[in-house]
Image (cartoon, rainbow, N blue to C red):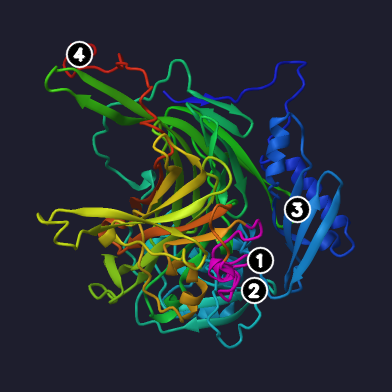
Amino acid sequence: MDDLHHSTTAEPGATPAPRHPLTPLDAAELLSAVAIIRANKTFGDHVLFEVIELKEPAPDALAAYMAGRSWPREARANVFLADKPGIWRLTLSLTDSAVTSQSFHPEARPMIQLEQFIQIEDIVRAHPDFIAACAKRGITDMSKVCVDPWSAGNFSVPGEEGGYLSHTFAWLRLYENENFYAHPIEGVNAVVDIKAGKVIRVDDYGAEIPVPMGEYNYEAQFRTEFRKPLKPLDIVQPDGPSFELDGRVISWDKWRCVIGFNAREGLTLHDIAHDGRPIVQRASIAEMVVPYGVPDNGHFRKNVFDIGEYGLGKLTNSLTLGCDCLGHIAYLDADLNTMTGDIFHIEKAICIHEEDDGILWKHWDFRTGRTEVRRGRKLVISSICTVGNYEYAFYWYFDQAGMIEFEMKATGIINTSACLPGQPSKYGVEVAPGVQGHIHQHAFCARLEMAVDGPGNSIVECNCHAEEDPAKNPYGNAFYQVDTVLKTELEACRRANPDTQRYWKIINPGKLNHTGKPVGYKLMPDATLTPYFKSGSPSGIRSNFMQNHLWVTKFDPEERYPAGEYMNHSTGAGGVADFVKQDRNLENTALVLWHVFGLHHQVRTEDFPVQPCITTGFKLMPSGFFDQNPGIDIAPGVNRASKLHGASCCGQ
């Protein structure tokens, strides 16, 4: 059974507690921000809104909240005009109804907005050059043509200078709800000037490759046969969940954090603490880039920044009870702004539930025959976003042994192109006759503001080595770990090294455990990538954060994104590769970790017509943070609902 959980509410007549200062802006605050901006004579009623989000307050706000006091609310906003280049970056006081700072960035372009997706498709389908290119391929009904609005990147193509552009790809949908990604229209790409609302060029690389017409559907309505279903497996919590939700503040077992959400990153977590001890001040996936490895036709431009060029907020799914999450579920809605300043409401944007996590620890004493075993549970906070053809499912896990884990599940439909049947490109795999998927990667960058047991952290690199001194290693078995403090930002530009079992540890030199060592958490780089683009190429320049698997910077609230603040048509400047050039001190200070991980995806036939989930992620594990196994105090127990096959109850 799947149950919907309701968050706690104040007793009637009680004075409401102050809202946590990291609570995202609600609909009323968003509308207030819109009104403040429109009232400013610089903008007026014709201004368009890219992003309006909470300006996250300084640590003083948390102290005020803990003391029961409210805190002034501020917002950030990026706005632009339909007929002029550039973006205004604003700070607003919602408390005083005022714009408190503004700066103009003439070379910046806004993200491509969800509201523009269909507009771009309509513009392309109506253009005579595109209609003619489709006719060369036997397509005359333009209503069946589907056009995806890919970002254009920055490739120094003549005629594209200074534009706010989309470089599009097209497919053919044979009938309603049919899977059009089975019918790629190869060799034709329209380039759209989004501000002008017009096609500036149609690139036609030739119609030699026909549109594949085989049908490969995934919707249930098109299937005539299904495998025999398994018997029901219900997640039942008769006493309800073990978490408590107070607004956006969640408490579970010994964990506590604040759940945030914004238009660019989507799901964010704040003020993560275990048993009252802080660990991470803020955690998010701050950027994602998908470089494709194919130089053919217009595919060389496929190097899309799904977070920085589109924003995950509006692309977040409204989840379904009993499908996306199982068990006793709590949902959080999300409110964002539209381009025109209205409210974009996403019901059930974030899912919260518990999962059984298997054996947490166990030991059998062979001398006495005595066994001690504890099962673990984990808290799951998740959301799912759809970026065109792909779904990205974000999962944050908290277990009962002090570990924080992030898992990304990628599903949806691979980006397809056409090939001659049996003759896929060197850079692709044929997944159906005449349909191929290109080799590509999904690179993610987690941004982690660390606060391990409070302020004043340092970063340590840990490497293992075999003992080379024969006098110390007469049996050839000796190896040991060397810990090295990375003292400055340039020293901390690091790559994973499986030869030395490298990992990184964040320590608090001012807090010691019972062995006299600094308390710490370690970052396990289990899913790193090797980038294959040339560093000086257009894609390599803009994706330069992929050069390292770890970057560490001294905290600066304005250094928020690893590839830059304004990613659409970006130059590669203004990201973490520039931040570290300051070479600031990293010892006993406020640290930000930028961990790059991802998926290397050589497409399989099994990935079509819809891809089973493939996963990547990372772990933050306690390393000297606790004096002993933090799960040692879990009480023993037996799950009496479990049944022995062929019997009626547990153990019988």
96 falls in the magenta region: no
Query: Do the CB atoms of the residues marked 2 and 1 lie less than 8 Å apart?
Result: yes
The nearer-to-camera label among 3 and 4 is: 4
Q: Give the range drawn in magenta.
A: 556-583
The residue to which callout 3 is attached is 341
Which image quadrant for residue 580? bottom right
Q: Which residue is drawn at 27% across and 40% down?
A: 226
Q: Which element is circle 4 on?
A: loop
Q: Which of marks 2 and 4 is in front?
A: 4
Q: Going from the N terminus, do you reach mark 3 or mark 2 first?
A: 2
The kind of secondary structure element at disc 1 is loop
Using residue 580 as the reference point, say whether residue 630 is left or right of it. Answer: left
Whether residue 228 is visible here, answered yes or no, is: yes
Q: Of residues 546 and 13, which is closer to you in this image?
A: 546
In terms of secondary structure, where does tag 3 sit?
loop
Q: Are marks 4 and 1 in contact (CB under 8 Å)?
A: no
Residue marked by disc 2: 164
At 21% from the left edge and 59% from the top edge, which residue is drawn? 466
Q: Using the numbered discs, state the Cα–Cα distance from disc 3 to disc 4 in whole angstroms.
A: 61 Å
Mark 4 or mark 2, which is nearer the start of the sequence?
2
Q: In this view, does 81 lie to the left or right of 98?
A: left
Q: What element carries label 2?
A: loop
Residue drawn where x is 46% and y is 15% of the image:
239
Label located before the other in sequence (2 or 1): 1
Is 526 in front, or is 146? 526
Which residue, given by chain and number where applicable, does mark 4 sit on?
Answer: 651
Residue bearing mark 1: 110
* Type of amino acid at the residue the image marks with label 1: Pro
